[in-house]
Every structure is written in structure tokens, then in C-alpha cells.
Image (tube, rainbow, N blue to C red):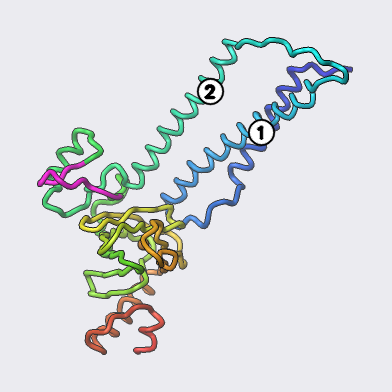
Amino acid sequence: MKVPSNIITLLAGIILTLISLWYGQNHGLMPAAASETAQEVDGLFNLMMTISTGLFLLIEGVLIYSVIRFRRQKGDTTDGPPVEGNVPLEIVWTAIPTVIVFILAIYSFEVYNEMGGLDPMASMDHGGSQMAHEHHDHGQLVALNSDNKSIALGLGASPNSDPNVEPLVIEVQGLQYAWIFTYPESGVISGEMHVPIDRPVQLKMTASDVIHAFWLPELRLKQDVIPGREVQLTFTSNRLGNYPIICAELCGAFHGGMKTTMTVDSPEDFEQWIQDNTFALTDTPGAVAMSSEQSAINN
Ligand SMILES: [Cu+2]
């Protein structure tokens, strides 16, 4: 009995779709997601992975099938049939990628907006914020400062975030080859970053020498840090743990060593850490607490 070819095509399509859907969720390529927006970024990545897997299997499958099925027969030295285009096929393989690109564009725009990427000036207290809001009202993505020179950089507050919740402000300074974190509320200065869980954090970042890039893989955030400019990064972590902070811009000979840790603490542990490092500051005037281990020694 011969199975009709359209049944085989349908079965192959179903199997291909199921494999793609499964692999899109189980590729295991991403580290832990430590925030809601990181999970949304993963949603976008997983969709792209699903589509790519489907296209890979389809194209490679047809290629391998054709290599075997239409290979040269023994003793056949004639030319192959002259094939000159196929209009319906060309329309289909142009239309499908167009639709895919539109879906991905809209989806990624949505995720970027969720992250606060479309309104970097939203919670900035610069003199230019009024101007920035005027521009924002007209739907412009680029906000000008009052001096009309600097353009807002970074990620502001998510449009979904509660405007009544004050974010924890941390000043981040990138320099060859370290990150320095200053907590203006308490005066703590540290070489590693601690943040409380479930509270919005607003990083105000500058570089003192060359361009660095502040990369938090578990938050799916990466932001260039530029000398002479303030760059903002706003996020809320929802997962306790230690996560690497890595410089992702080749910034000199020891760029590879420009790493530290972000610790997401419970609110109590965070308060404790702030207190420990504040004591370290007052006990030995002028001393800078570079790590919690060091402050433990000081106590
Ligand atoms: Cu660097």
C-alpha cells in the first residue's frame, strides 16, 4: 500500500512542529532568570528558538531528502531538468519570513517597553526631565535634555511599575578595572552590589576613564557606561542569590578581570549588610568596605 504524499507531508509537518515547540522551551541555553523582565526576554528568545529550530529542520530536512532522492543515477551523464523559478513558491517563502519578522518586531518592542527601554528619562531627576516628558508625549523615543545636547540613555521605570514605590538608588562607577557601588541613602561604598528582593533598583552609572559595559546575565541586562554621561538602568529582581556582574566592553589589558557579584538579599539581610558596612565605615575613618567578608573582619 502506498501512503499518499500529502499525508506524509502533513505528518512530517506535525512532527517538525512538535520538536520545535519542545526544543524552544528546553534548549537550556540561558542562565537562571532573576527578574520578571528576564523571564519576558526568555519568552522572546524561546519563540525565536522555536522558529529557528523549525526552519533548520525544514531546510536541512529538504536538503538531505533531495540529496538522497534526486542523486545522480549510475551511468546517467545527462543534464538535470532546466528549472526556472516558481512564482507561487517564491511568494510563499517571502511572505512567511515577512510575517515572522513583523511578529518578532512587535513582540520585542513590547518586551523592551516592559523593561522601561522606551522611557529612560521617566524617573530621572535631571533639569531636562520636563523637556523629556514633552518629547515623550509626542511619542518620540529619544528625549533631549534642556541643553539640547545629551540624549537619555538606558532603561527607565517600567510603565507597569508602581509610581509610588521609591526605587533604591545606587550610584555605579566603572573604572579600569572595577565597579564601585555607592549607596547615597546610607553612604555605603562597596566593590560588590547588594540589592533587596522585589524592590525596584535604579542604577545611576558613569565611567571614569573609558567605555565599560555593565552586564547582568541573570537579569538579561547589558548597558554601556560612558565617561562624562549618566546612564540609567532600572530593574526589580525577584530571585534570591548571587549573580555575576561582568564588564562586557573590551576596556583595557585587564578587562577580563573586571567582574564582581550582585547579591539579591531578603529585605532583612539587605538591611544587615547596609548596617555592617556602615559600621565598618564609622569604626575606621576613611576605610572603604570593599566586601562583606572584609566588613566581617572589621566587626
Ligand atoms: Cu570594563
> Which residue is the site of mark 1?
57
Q: Circle 2 sits in a helix, a strand or a loop, which is it?
A: helix
The amino acid at mark 2 is Ile
Q: Can residue 149 be found in the magenta stretch?
A: yes
Q: Earlier in the sequence, mark 2 or mark 1?
A: 1
Nearest to the observer: residue 111 or residue 249: 249
Identify the residue at horizontal 43%, vertical 36% (top origin).
107
Q: Secondary structure at mark 1?
A: helix
Name the magenta segment's main secondary structure. loop
Q: Quadrant of ligand 1?
A: bottom left
Mark 2 → mark 1, Cα distance in angstroms: 16 Å
Residue 182 locus on image (x, y percent): 26, 70
- Is residue 103 rendered to the left or right of residue 207? right
Q: Quadrant of residue 215?
A: bottom left
Question: What span is colored magenta in the figure?
Answer: 143-154
Amino acid identity at mark 1: Leu
Q: Is 226 drawn above or below residue 186 in the view shown?
A: above
Question: Which residue corresponds to mark 2?
Answer: 96
Q: Residue at x 28, y 51 (%)?
A: 162
